[in-house]
Image (cartoon, grey):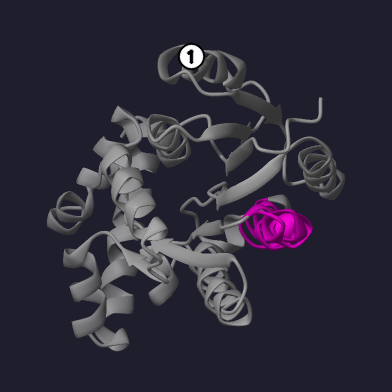
Amino acid sequence: MKEKPEEQYAVITGASQGLGRAYATELAKRKYNVVLVSLPGQNLQQLSDWIKREYKVQSYYYEADFSVDSNILGLTNWLNENFNISILINNAGIGGSKAFDEASVMDIHTIIQVNVKATAVITHQLLQNLKRQPQSYILNVSSIAAFSPVGYKTVYPASKAFVHSFSRGLCAELKYTNVFVSVIHPGAMATNEEISSRIEKQGIIGKLTLLKPEKVAQYSVSRLLKRDTVIMVNPVIWLFSAILPIWIRLPMMTKIVKREISYEKCLYNGC
């Protein structure tokens, strides 16, 4: 299935919904051919077919669970064998709110595996492909949480801090090549009604920081192509993080997340 040499593709992980889906449609609107990657059972084929019809670009898809090492390498081998890649968006990620001692070993493993290992390994395995193109871009999706630890989300912010540090270091390393690396730090996004409702229950901070994936994708793709190294999409939460010292910010954010968890437990237990 080797594509024609002149055809170049954008690869988007976590592409079935939310920000990943928004990136796929934004790039297709800009007439980029796309390869969509997501977990099995996410209606990825339907999305790929719709993009082809709607935007008249080439669209392929690949289903993989990144919690398994062999699946990551299976994806990158398939991509390198079949496509010329000029844009890589490492968007796949997983989080969640839970007391650390209530999390399972698999919960911890999956966050580190998907957010940290998959991002690094996919980038590593596709880098030579990206270098062969006239101009290439890597966009890694971190989080505003990368700048502050938060109780009840202990592993997730740490994993996103890795994504930030990894991206900045790789950008410096590739400065004099044809591959540009950027990292985006979005806040909470209204990916569906349930998530929007949960975030809004966090109070005024949740409402002020809620973003629409389509707007985030449009803005960040524009900034990526203009070679912005760090992309901040929510000035309110960034200002909040920058101004408040950690000894105020950490207990405040922990209290907000704890309240959210307590509310969900109450709903589940019928109280």
- Residue occupying image coordinates x 51% and y 60%: 99
In the figure, 49 relative to 7: above or below?
above
Magenta-highlighted residues: 107-133
Q: Nearer the viewer, residue 267 or 165?
A: 165
Q: Nearer the viewer, residue 232 or 158?
A: 232
Drawn side of residue 39 relative to residue 262, left or right? right
In the figure, 73 relative to 115: above or below?
above
In the figure, 105 relative to 177: above or below?
above
Q: Can residue 180 be seen in the rendering of this structure?
A: yes
Task: From the top left corner, tell me how far across and down residue 152 is, in percent.
Answer: 45, 62
Task: From the top left corner, tell me how far across and down residue 258 is, in percent.
Answer: 35, 59
Drawn side of residue 182 relative to residue 202, left or right? right
Count of labels in the image: 1
Task: From the top left corner, tell me how far across and down residue 140 is, in percent.
Answer: 52, 59
Crowding near the residue tagged with mark 1, few <14, some 14–19, many ≥20 C-alpha atoms within 10 Å? some
Which of the 4 image quadrants contains residue 178? bottom right
In the figure, 174 relative to 262: above or below?
below
Q: Which residue is mark 1?
A: 50
Q: Secondary structure at mark 1?
A: helix
**Residue 123 is inside the magenta segment:** yes
Task: From the top left corner, tell me how far across and down residue 76 is, in percent.
Answer: 78, 46
- Residue occupying image coordinates x 44% and y 31%: 28
- Residue occupying image coordinates x 65% and y 32%: 39
Q: Nearer the viewer, residue 178 or 119?
A: 178
**Main secondary structure along the magenta-highlighted residues:** helix
Image quadrant containing the N terminus: top right
Q: Amino acid at mark 1?
A: Trp
